[in-house]
């Protein structure tokens, strides 16, 4: 007999956007996304006059989109894809090559690039399931894919420009090159990604994702098709990565191996998600905001910055299983319950 998600009783309310089980009410389920989008929409009013600060804000939103996509894959189904930058690079380079060299319309190039990234992500999930790979070995396989992609980009100079990169002409006469317009475009993408994430959480697919994340054996015994749902997560998250990489390539006007390299993308996204909370709704956004500030504070550290991120990542995974923000939120709820209990006790 297969367990049904509707039979699950909701637990006590969790902090903003970090509930393990999404609320059944549509308003309660989606209002955190609306509030977050509204707050972030005010940023250009504050930074709009500074082109440099707007560029940093756009880059922060790009990494936020990466983090939401990675959260669909790793945070929902425990598939450690160490190829976030590679899948985004597949989207970016493919869209640029199809638009600038093959002469296809930019929108068509983006759609095909997104489809290719999704197919590759789904294939990696299929391999992981087919070979019964655990979290660590899935990470090793996807890291090998990431390194192979980097070598491919360096080797195919006539297509990718090699180490020098490519100047992107498609999109130069559109709103994509305006920093404020690009900011709102990427903000809209994050909001859509969050809506998709929440909709998945509220569906039978989300119930299966939670079961997989908590206990794969128990999920299988409950009738969850492990292979199918992991491939779903790989397809959806990789499509988000490919689309973000494609749009960013045309918005920035330049792509190079460093744009999507492992140390530049994957390490940072891991830190963002580990801090904000794995499998949570707004964890990627919270992690992105904190990381954007931290990144600016450490900008003068050079290569030492990557080492510091690595140490921070180790500390987060060792000290906070589901993320620093959920751990702090749980601690605050505990203090609040204790305070209420003490206030409600009769005087001695």
Image (cartoon, grey):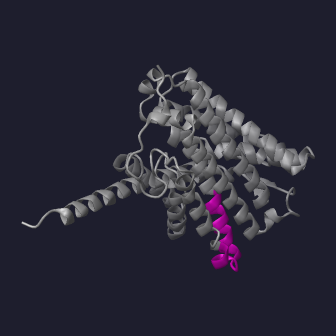
Which residue is found at the position 66% from the left and 36% from the top?
235
Type of secondary structure dominating the magenta stretch: helix
Which residue is found at the position 58% from the left and 58% from the top?
33
**Nearer to me, 320 or 209:** 209
Q: Is residue 82 visible?
A: no
Specify the farthest residue to the left. 348
Where does the image place residue 3, in percent across and percent down from the top left?
46, 26
Whether residue 343 sits left or right of residue 219 in the image: it is left
Specify the farthest residue to the bottom. 49
Whether residue 65 sits left or right of residue 274 in the image: it is right
Q: Is residue 196 visible?
A: yes
Q: Quadrant of the C terminus?
A: bottom left
Whether residue 71 sits left or right of residue 254 in the image: it is left
Where does the image place residue 56, in percent across and percent down from the top left?
64, 67
In the image, is residue 146 part of the stretch drawn in magenta?
no
Q: With respect to residue 255, does 279 lie above or below?
A: above
Which residue is found at the position 45% from the left and 28% from the top?
216
Where does the image place residue 54, in percent across and percent down from the top left?
67, 71
Which residue is found at the position 82% from the left and 49% from the top?
96
> Magenta segment range?
44-62
**Nearer to me, 253 or 210:** 210
**Nearer to me, 165 or 319:** 319
Whether residue 183 sits left or right of residue 327 in the image: it is right
Image-quadrant location for residue 41:
bottom right
Q: With respect to residue 222, does 246 lie above or below?
A: below
Q: With respect to residue 270, does 305 lie above or below?
A: below
Image-quadrant location for residue 84:
top right
Q: How many marks?
A: 0
Where does the image place residue 44, in percent across and percent down from the top left?
67, 74
């Amino acid at each position: 007999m297969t367990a049904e998600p509707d039979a699950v009783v909701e637990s006590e309310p969790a902090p903003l956007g970090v509930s393990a089980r999404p609320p059944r009410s549509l308003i309660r389920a989606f209002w955190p996304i609306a509030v977050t989008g509204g707050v972030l929409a005010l940023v250009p009013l504050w930074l709009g006059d500074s082109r440099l600060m707007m560029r940093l804000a756009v880059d922060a939103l790009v990494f936020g989109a990466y983090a939401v996509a990675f959260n669909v894959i790793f945070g929902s189904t425990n598939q450690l894809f160490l190829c976030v930058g590679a899948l985004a690079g597949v989207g970016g380079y493919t869209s640029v090559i199809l638009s600038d060299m093959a002469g296809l319309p930019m929108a068509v190039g983006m759609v095909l690039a997104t489809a290719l990234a999704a197919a590759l992500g789904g294939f990696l999930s299929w391999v992981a399931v087919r070979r019964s790979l655990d979290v660590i070995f899935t990470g090793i396989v996807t890291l090998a894919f990431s390194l192979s992609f980097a070598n491919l980009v360096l080797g195919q100079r006539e297509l990718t420009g090699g180490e020098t990169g490519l100047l992107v002409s498609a999109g130069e006469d559109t709103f994509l090159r305006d920093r404020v317009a690009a900011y709102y475009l990427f903000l809209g993408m994050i909001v859509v990604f969050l809506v998709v994430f929440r909709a998945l959480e509220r569906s039978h697919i989300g119930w299966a994702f939670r079961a997989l994340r908590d206990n794969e054996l128990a999920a299988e015994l409950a009738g969850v098709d492990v292979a199918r749902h992991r491939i779903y997560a790989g397809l959806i998250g990789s499509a988000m990565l490919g689309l973000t990489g494609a749009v960013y390539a045309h918005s920035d006007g330049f792509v190079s191996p460093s744009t999507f390299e492992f140390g530049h993308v994957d390490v940072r996204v891991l830190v963002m998600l580990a801090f904000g909370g794995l499998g949570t709704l707004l964890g990627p956004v919270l992690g992105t905001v904190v990381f954007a500030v931290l990144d600016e504070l450490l900008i003068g550290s050079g290569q030492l910055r990557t080492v510091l991120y690595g140490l921070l990542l180790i500390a987060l995974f060792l000290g906070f299983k589901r993320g620093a923000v959920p751990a702090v939120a749980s601690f605050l709820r505990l203090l609040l319950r204790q305070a209420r209990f003490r206030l409600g006790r009769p005087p001695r």
